[in-house]
Structure formats: structure tokens, C-alpha cells
Image: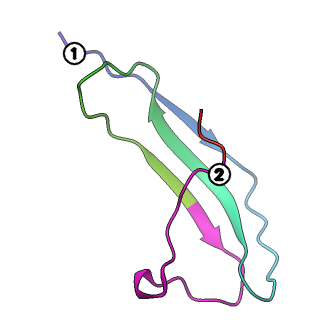
Amino acid sequence: MTRIIFSTVRAPHEPAFTVGDNANFVSQNVPMDMFQGLTNPASITMVNIGSTTWRTADNYFLAAINPL
């Protein structure tokens, strides 16, 4: 039996435009329980509040700065 319960976190969405690279966290949807060896769906939503367009070709990506 598979049990998937999601925890959703949302942040106040008040983007203020800035010059250059900048982003605000909007929300995340991550399972409360994750089991070793299984793939678990998760999502993180950010909003670009900077003046730079994010392009994969320009090497933009989402990454953890201090992963546990």
C-alpha cells in the first residue's frame, strides 16, 4: 500500500522588480513521507523578479545552496 501525503508551503507573493538576477520563493509541494529507492514527485515554484530572463542555454538552474 502506497501512502502519499503532500505538504504544501506558500509564501506571500509580493514581487518587487529589481535589476539583474533576483527571485522570490512562491510555493513548494513535497511528500511528507519518502521511501528509500522510490521516486517521489515534488515541485518548487519561484517567480523571477529580476531583469534577467532565465535561459537554460545561459546556465540558469534551480539548486540548493546548503543541502543537508
Q: Residue at x 31, y 18 (%)?
A: 35
Coloring scheme used: rainbow
Q: Residue at x 71, y 63 (%)?
A: 24
Q: Is residue 57 magenta?
A: yes
Residue 9 % position (x, y): 61, 39
- Measure the C-alpha gap from mark 1 to mark 2: 31 Å
Q: Residue at x 31, y 34 (%)?
A: 40
- The residue mark sitting in front, 1 or 2, is 2
Residue interval drawn in magenta: 46-65
Name the residue nearer the viewer: 20 or 5. 20
Q: Is residue 7 above or below residue 16?
A: above
Amino acid type assigned to the residue bearing label 1 in the image = Thr
Q: Is residue 52 magenta?
A: yes
Left or right: 15 in relation to 32: right
The label on residue 2 is 1
For numbered disc 1, what is the local secondary structure?
A: loop
Residue 68 % position (x, y): 59, 32
Q: Earlier in the sequence, mark 1 or mark 2?
A: 1
The label on residue 25 is none
Q: Is residue 55 above or below residue 24?
A: below
| Mark 1 crowdedness (10 Å alpha carbons): few <14, some 14-19, many ≥20 | few
Quadrant of the frame with the N terminus = top left
- Give the image quarter of residue 19: bottom right
Name the main secondary structure of what is drawn in magenta.
loop
The label on residue 65 is 2
- Give the image quarter of residue 6: top left
For numbered disc 2, what is the local secondary structure?
A: loop
| Mark 2 crowdedness (10 Å alpha carbons): few <14, some 14-19, many ≥20 | few
Residue 46 % position (x, y): 59, 62
- Cβ atoms at labels 1 and 2 below 8 Å apart: no
Q: Residue at x 40, y 42 (%)?
A: 42
Left or right: 45 in relation to 51: left
